[in-house]
Structure formats: structure tokens, C-alpha cells
Image (cartoon, coloured by chain):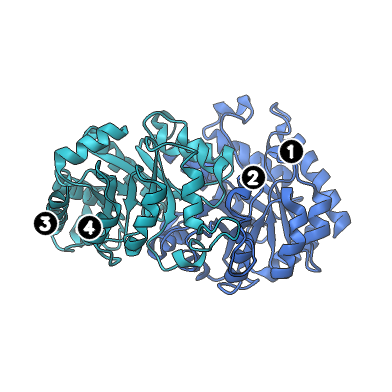
Chain colours: A blue, B cyan
Amino acid sequence: MNRQQLIELIRRKKSFLCVGLDSDINKIPRHLLSEPDPVFAFNKAIIDATIHLAVAYKPNLAFYESRGVKGLQSLEQTMQYLNRFSDQVFTIADAKRGDIGNTSEQYARSVFCPKESGFEFDAITVAPYMGEDSVKPFLGFDDKWVVLLALTSNKGAFDFQIIENKATGLRLFEEVLTRSKNWGTPENMMYVVGATKAEMLADIRRIVPNNFLLVPGVGAQGGSLAEVVRYGMTPECGLLVNASRSILFASTGTDFAEKARQEAQSMQQEMAAWL
Amino acid sequence: MNRQQLIELIRRKKSFLCVGLDSDINKIPRHLLSEPDPVFAFNKAIIDATIHLAVAYKPNLAFYESRGVKGLQSLEQTMQYLNRFSDQVFTIADAKRGDIGNTSEQYARSVFCPKESGFEFDAITVAPYMGEDSVKPFLGFDDKWVVLLALTSNKGAFDFQIIENKATGLRLFEEVLTRSKNWGTPENMMYVVGATKAEMLADIRRIVPNNFLLVPGVGAQGGSLAEVVRYGMTPECGLLVNASRSILFASTGTDFAEKARQEAQSMQQEMAAWL
């Protein structure tokens, strides 16, 4: 999906909600465990309940890899289902990959080359520590995106990401933004910026005024949607705000899909008012 | 495998060679493509040819994930085979993972909890960008190890890893070492330091005098074993030097395993002289 299509999707659905599919088999409703593939059954129900409210879905690969081959099969089923709606949703592999060039190339193929891997996503999250040649291989695919970590939502973000560069005065996350914005364009690069650091969004927008930002941390992690919009929204929206646990596990009973829908609708309605 | 066992293994085999299983299906000998699982057949032949010469094997997960479920099955076969020799080899999942705490916990389970994932490695490579709470979940498993990225072997290492902290005067990779050495101990933390930056090993050893270092970049990437030993070796060795392509693809004919053995033996003999 390209940038213009994503912007139109946001306008059509009046939403910039991304649903994070952190589908922990130990947290899904117990009655699903008798299904042939409980995690896929859970994801399908969540998708069906929220697809009119969300513009993006973000499977968190860790929750599939922790179940090995079986987990990857659940992810494959989920992506085959989501790809039926490829003009209605943007998909992000939340994977935080990044390695030397020939290896990043393989990671890119794992999510962007369905003939080889069985998987097709629109985007993948990438970690910047290894620099330009670790990120560039992900940028060589038409209408595919890198979502690069800039300022994350967790406590550990303060360990290294805010270190101030003696030579430039920029903090590390600002260095990442400043350098990487020349590796791609606003047509194929987004950034992860945690909602728990919303006040820093103003600094971030000075460096990357037009790039989309993927914003986790609203909901279970405590970030505020109003603050994110205030400091991060652009005329074209420029935001994908993710919620995972608050939607997926709104209920652990047989009404989980309905409760997920209600939670997503509540966020979508707030978003519609901001758009 | 614990530290003492690893040190004994190095002494017994007179080697600190790690063989990187970057087993690209497009590069393995063509005659293997008729095997039921060509990548496993390749890995098994490489392991059989080198197991008396190498102390560690490091499957690079990207080369398996790029083939989707089939690739993960090849990795599963490979690890089941390697785990038959669990007292003779140390195994590293080269994955460069790292995410918020609840997600890193899942990545840890994907490599350290065989009952859940089917996979059991001794160690996993982890990226430090997201800080302490992204690394700590990997450290909660007995005799399992984190191999944290410090100074990588690629050109992009110079983009962010050498940024100098205005507050402390330390470069980013030194900040990573200084802070993270308190997250674990030399019993469960190693660091990735590229052989292509061997002269910086002296600075690194001042911060982490006792931790094992995993050193890629000798061979195809151009690093020198003599330089790595000179600046990085400790009385207990303290090094695992990785070679991937130079061993795996020493020949692409039917003699590939024999040529791999010769290449590994040449490195092992040089290592034996240094020990």
C-alpha cells in the first residue's frame, strides 16, 4: 500500500487506529482452545469485529515465534486472512529486525516476498543500532515500508535513546531521525514514537514533519491520545496509533470480540473527532 | 551450557571457532536440492564435517525466516540435530531481537523454552537500542545467555555506535557495555564486537575484562584473527570467533563439506596456536 492509499483509507474510515495482534495463547479466551488453530480463530474474530474501525493491523511476531512452527502457521493463516482485505488495511510486521546488509535482505524477504516466505506485509519495524546498511535492504521493495525505531514507549528508552551527541547536540533518537530520513522518503519510512513521550513529538516533528509515525503506548502503557494528536498530527494525519492489549483482552469471555469492537469503536470515535 | 563448561570445551577442542549457519538456499550446492529438506541436509553435512573443530554454531535466523514455515522447519531439524551434541557445542540464535519487556519475554521463550517453541539454544543475540527492560527478560533462564550488540562489523556501525555522549565522554558502544554489564554477569552476558574494528577491542576490554565476546567479521568481511586475539583474548580465552560464508561456501560442488572442514581446520589450527 502506498502513502496516498493509506491517507485515503484514514479519511474513509475516519480512523488512524492500528490494532496490535499480540495474541498470547495464554491470554486468549479459554473456549477457543478447542479450535484447530486457537490463535488464528482469535485473530479472525478480532479482525472481523474491528476491520471497519481500524486502518492497520500489527502482528507482534514474538507472540507467534514463541510457539515455534505452530505459531508461524497461526501467523500465516492470519496474514492470508488479512490479505483478503489488502485494500482496506495496512499491515505491519512488528519484528524490530536489523542486521548486516545480506542478513537484513533476508529479513526483508521474510515479510515482503510471499512467493518465498508465504508472508506479505506492507511494513516492518526495524531497529536502527546497526546503521544505514542494516536498514537500506528493507527499502528496496515497491510500496513497502520501514517503520524505524526512534523513541520507544518503554522505560529503557531513557537508557540510550536520549544520550546527547557531543558533536551535534542532538539526542540519539534525533540523530536516528536526522540521518535516516535521507535513507528513505516519507513514501517508505515511518518512525516508532511512544505515546508515553508525547511531549517529545514536537521535537520529532521539527525533524520529520511529513513522515507517518507509528505510536504505541496508548492504552495499557498509559499514553494519552489527545497529547499524541496535539504534538504529532499533520494535515494528512501522519499518525497510526496502536492499541494491543486494551482491545484484544477487553474481555476474556465469550464476548471478547464484541468487547474488542466496543473498545476499538471508542478509540475510533475519538480519532474521528480529531480528524 | 554454563561458562565453565564453555571454557572447558574451548580447551578440549583447542578452538574458539563458531560456525555461522547462514544457510542460504540459493547458495547451497545444487545437488542437495533433491533432498527432502535441502537446507537441513546442508547444515547436517557442515556440522558433521566441522563438529570436532568448532565449539559453537550460530544459525542466522534471517536465512530460515525468509523461507517462512518451511524455513523454520529446516531450523527445527538443524537444532534437533545439534542438540544431540549439547555437551559438545554451544548454540547461538543469531536473531538481533529486542522489544518492550512482555515482548522480549516471548522472544526469549522462542529460543529457550523447547516445550513451547520446539527450539533450544544456549544463547541469543540481542539489540540494545530499547534499553534495560528490553534485555532483562532474556537473562532469566538458567545457563542461557544474551549476546548483546556492542560494536558491529558493518559499515553502518559508524552511524550511531561511535556517537560520543556529551555527559560522559563515552561512545555509544561504550555506554552499552558500561550500563549493560550490570544487567547480567560474565556468566550470562556476551557482547558482539566486529573483527573489522579489532583495534577498539582494547577499549572494550577495559570495560568488560571478563565477558566473552562473539566476534564476527573474520573471513568474508575482512577482519584479522591475529588482531582479534591480540586485543581481545583473556586468560580464559574470552572469545568466540565466527566464520560463516568462508566455511559454508568454501566450495559449491559435491566436495563442499570436505572444503568446509579444511577451512574450519585452518582456522582451528591458528586458534590452537594462540591458546
Q: Is residue B87 above or below residue B226?
A: above
Q: CA distance from mark 4 to mark 2?
A: 39 Å
Query: Could you say where residue A53 lies in the image, as x and y percent from the top left?
Result: 76, 50
Relative to the observer, which residue lies in front, A223 or B120?
A223
Whether residue B12 can be seen here: yes
Is the same chain shared between marks 4 and 2? Answer: no
Location of residue B11 by image quarter: top left
Tell me which numbered mark, 4 or 3, is placed earlier along the sequence: 4
Residue appearing at x 48%, y 63% in the figure? B162
Identify the disc placed on residue B130. none
Residue appearing at x 64%, y 45% in the figure? A154
Q: CA distance from mark 3 to mark 1?
A: 59 Å
Q: CA distance from mark 2 to mark 1?
A: 24 Å
- Marks 2, 1: nearer the viewer: 2
Q: Which residue is mark 4?
A: B248
Secondary structure, mark 1, is helix
Question: Which amino acid type corresponds to the residue marked 3 in the rendered image?
Answer: Gln
Q: Which residue is mark 3?
A: B262
Identify the disc placed on residue A154. 2
Q: Is residue A148 above or below residue A158?
A: below
Question: Which amino acid type corresponds to the residue marked 1 in the rendered image?
Answer: Ala
Residue appearing at x 49%, y 68% in the figure? A132
Question: Which amino acid type corresponds to the residue marked 2 in the rendered image?
Answer: Asn
Query: Could you say where residue A151 lies in the image, as x and y percent from the top left?
Result: 65, 55
Q: Chain of mark 1?
A: A
Residue appearing at x 26%, y 37% in the figure? B6
- Image marks 2 and 1: residues in contact by CB distance under 8 Å: no
Q: Which residue is mark 1?
A: A260
